[in-house]
Amino acid sequence: MAINRRDFLKSTAAGAAGALVTPYFFHRTALAADTVDVGVLFSQTGGLSIIEKSLSDATLMAIQEINDSGGVLGKQINPIVEDGASDPKTYNEKASKLVISDKVPTVFGSYTSASRKAVLPVFEKRRNLYFYPTYYEGFECSKNVVYTGAVPNQQLSNFIPWIIENLGKKKFFIVGSNYIYPREMAKVCKILIEGNGAEWVADEYLELGHSEWGAMVNKIKSSGCDVVLSNVVGDSVVAFYREFKNQGLTHDKLPICATVTSEIEIAAMGPEYAVGSYTSFPYFQAIDTDLNKAFIERYRMFVNDPKAVTHHALESSYFQVYLWKQALEKAGEATPEAIRAGVMGQEYDAPNGHVKIDPENLHTFLTPRIAEWLPDGQGKIVDDYGEPIRPLPYVAYGETEDTLFCTEKGLDTSKLKG
Amino acid sequence: MIDVLFIGLSLGSILLLVALGLAITYGAMGVINMAHGEMVMIGAYTTVMSAIWLGIGLIPSILLAFIVTALLGWLIERIVVKRLYGRLLDTLLATWGVAILIQQAVRLEFGLSFFGIHVEGLGPGLQNVTVPDFLQGAFSIGAVEINTYRTFIILVTAVLTLLTWYLMYRTPIGTQVRAIIRNPSMAAACGIDVDRVNALTFAYGSGLAGVAGVMMSGFKTVFPDMGTSMVVDGFMVVVMGGVGSLLGSVASAGILGEINGVVASVTNDILARAVVFGVVIMVIVLKPQGLFSFKGR
């Protein structure tokens, strides 16, 4: 590197000036630290932006609410919004940018597991903190991610026994999109189905985004099952429910019980195709509490759309910002380590009810609920667990509340093999 | 067994429905029209928009979608494709660009979303298309339950195929189109207005895609990317059937549909798709010109 004389003089002068005004300089940094930067990383463009834009909006809404009521530790939160562009590689690059160049102590983001897996190395290597709002397949134990969506046991451990006892169904047809989430869900389903004295007759998959359901529904029809457990994801859901009705199947005889079908898909397919089917989620737009109604109203105001729907991942995107705020207040300083220590055991009254971060595995205690879909496209809550249940990200491999695989010390791999 | 064959027939009719327009634009005109899937998408959105803004149901919007997409196709031909005849790869790139433009126009609501204006029925989300009651559910013939909507698709496809056949083989303009397929310069020398006939043919092919879009909207999901996967299937049918042969497209759509249906019912859909691609590859290897072909150009 060549240093010419002029530049050298300039920098020395600046250095000297800096030295002279040191007290003032420090004062300025303190002023600049009147805000806390955080990263907001969702897909604003691309195929997944349909849903991820709403998660981003919910996050920004929570940040704005906190700022309007005085911020956190007397500081305003400054969201740095980046676009993951529905592409895991872009996610990784943007996460690096937020962590390394913006030096944010926390990033809120991701909808798909693929994008989470893509950013995970960045957060683990740089010891930063990621808040992930989506329900996912479990099988992850990271010290650098706080998971506020449901894991399989929180969607299924009430659902399967309820189907068997209340609907009196004994033969399950498990169907899903062909990738990791539905496959892990199916594993948990089978454990629960067999444990509750019922049986499963088939376990079938279709490509992600596949919309030709003729052969599959015909198979369901001739399989002799009396209930369909669907882990079908995304736009395939619409084509599935329509084909189901079009082949003459009805939900009162052969109900579809789903883990992913939310208010959004119901609106797109037309509620008449889903009436009488069931979905299990910790949050539904139909939850009848003042807290939730006020939340929906504020969200609709925020996105300027009087018909906007709210759903599970969206609600988690919202309340996780408040959990983060409380963690930061407890920690007293905006570093990833301090926030991580502060978030353990943190509790909050979210629109879905009381939530709490498990200090062992950094997942969230959530209340499982089952809804039956009504002709107006809303769910009627037909079963409510009553209280939040503990997240067990390794339930597909035999994890129970007494034998946690993932603890504060990390993942106990010996249990995983056994 | 009958229900499996019926599903195969239905799959074939859906393939043909999408491929019919391509058989014209690619088969007859030698344009690799990557925007064909977007025409299907525009057809589907016409159904959504006309239900919201005009209160028109699915069936009347078939005609509307044909007109809208034919006009759009005509515009594309006049502005872009016209300059690219005989340059196969260039048409691929140019129409791909057009496809992206159309997709983004729908997703960004013609750019209005930048100004905070929301147009009902457009945007990145999933759209709902209401299907008339009498097309929902199933009816039974004897012991066999038949899917009403799929029957409707088969009928529409049959009507469109016959119409296309009639236009191509029984009308003066069809004769001109076929002359242009064989040899454009010779056709021009015989006094055929190649320019005008090409524009009309492209518009007709696009219009067919629009109708396909209306039919798709009733049982698939309507969103801006919906056409992308369909265009691949469409090319598969046309290439296997033999470029420029209507009969070839009909036959290959039928064969691929039945293979898909039968394999899917015996094993699963993922394997069925692999088998379908395998069959197409084999046909192309053994008969590079496709099932039905003639020497030309």
Image (cartoon, rainbow, N blue to C red):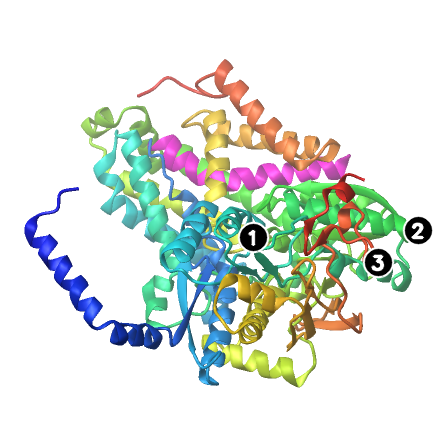
Residue type for callout 1: Thr
Residue occupying the far top of the picture: B286
* Residues at discs 3 and 1 in contact (Cβ within 8 Å): no
N-terminal-most mark, 2 or 3:
2
Relative vertical location of residue B208 with respect to residue A24 in this rendering, above or below: above
State the mark number for residue A197.
2
Q: Along the line of sight, which residue is nearer the eye, A192 or B40? A: A192
Q: Which residues are magenta?
A: B1-29
| Residue A300 or residue B128, whichever sits in front | A300
Q: Please, which chain is the residue tagged with disc 2 on?
A: A
Q: Residue at x 49, y 31 (%)?
A: B236
Residue at the (57%, 47%) spot, across then down? A209
Pointer 2 local density, CA inside 10 Å: few below 14, some 14–19, many at least 20: few
- Could you tell me if the residues under marks 2 and 3 are in contact, i.e. CB atoms within 8 Å? no
A250 in relation to A387, above or below: above
Whether labels 3 and 1 share one chain = yes
For the residues marked 3 and 1, what is the alpha-carbon distance in whole angstroms? 33 Å
Kind of residue indicated by mark 2? Gly
Indicate the secondary structure of the residue bearing disc 3.
loop
In the rendered structure, find residue A320 and report the number of the disc placed on it.
Answer: none
